[in-house]
Amino acid sequence: MTSIAELYRLQEVDLELQSARDDLTDVQSRLGEPEELIEARRAAEECQEALRVAERDFKDREAEADEQGRKIEAPSQRMYEGKVTNPKELEDLQQEVESLTRRRGALDDEALAAMERLDEAERALAEAQRHLEELTGTTGAEQDELRARQSTLEGEIASLEGQRAELAAGGDEALLDRYDELRAGRQGQAVAKVQGGSCQGCRILLPVNLIQRARAGDEVVQCNNCERILYVT
Ligand SMILES: [Zn+2]
């Protein structure tokens, strides 16, 4: 590759490559789980754990209340059988039954409160799971799109790199070096077309002799303002 026209074509490929690589970087940064989804999964796990605790608590309290119920059976049976006739003994027995019954009532209340907490934990878990499923659905579709875009861009980049290698193959090394140097700091534009007597890189009106030299094509002519290599079509 020696002509400025080919160098200009190389620049077009390089600009496309840069744009595709930028797009790919953007796509790759958006691939993976978003923070919101990670947070929703964590919340659902916490609700699951809270439900396990609430279930255990309810079972314990229910068992305690049942146990208390069994403790009342024997003394209340003795009381109603009428076998205890000693008034003092009967009074003690009555007090024991009353005390056990009060305790049973308190334990029943605790078991009821535990059941309400269990219901609440079940509702919270259902809500957290619904939110998680919703997010998984939308995020899944978005991630599929991003993966498809990534694959398209990778294909485009491979094809452009192939074109670039072909264009640069056997080229004038010194010219390619100068091209690379000029690209840096000029938004990747080392070559500028000349149109209406102006450099299209910096829009300045060019001296006529400079345009003539560039048109002749015997040498590499650069803009006297922005130093871009001039390409007269
Ligand atoms: Zn210029």
Image: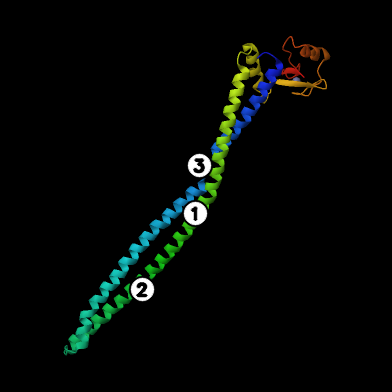
Residue 171 x, y percent position in the rendering: 63, 13
- Disc 1 to disc 2, C-alpha distance: 36 Å
- The residue carrying mark 2 is 109
> Would residue 90 be found to the left or right of residue 225 on screen?
left
- The residue carrying mark 1 is 133
- The residue carrying mark 3 is 32
Q: Say which of 175 and 114 sits in front.
A: 175
Q: Within the displayed image, which quadrant is ligand 1 positioned in? A: top right
Depth-wise, is mark 1 or mark 2 nearer the camera? Answer: 1
Circle 3 packing at 10 Å, graded few (<14), some (14-19), many (20+), is few
Q: Which corner quadrant holds the N terminus? A: top right
Q: Earlier in the sequence, mark 1 or mark 2?
A: 2
Q: Which corner quadrant holds the C terminus? A: top right
Q: Amino acid at mark 3?
A: Gly
- Disc 2 to disc 3, C-alpha distance: 49 Å
Visible in this render: residue 30? no
Q: Amino acid at mark 2?
A: Asp
Q: Say which of 182 and 108 sits in front.
A: 182
> Would residue 77 be found to the left or right of residue 223 on screen?
left
Residue 218 x, y percent position in the rendering: 74, 9
Residue 64, picture quadrant: bottom left
Q: Say which of 21 and 36 sits in front.
A: 21
Name above or below for residue 210 compared with residue 120.
above
Residue 75 x, y percent position in the rendering: 21, 81
- Disc 3 to disc 1, C-alpha distance: 17 Å
Q: Earlier in the sequence, mark 2 or mark 3?
A: 3
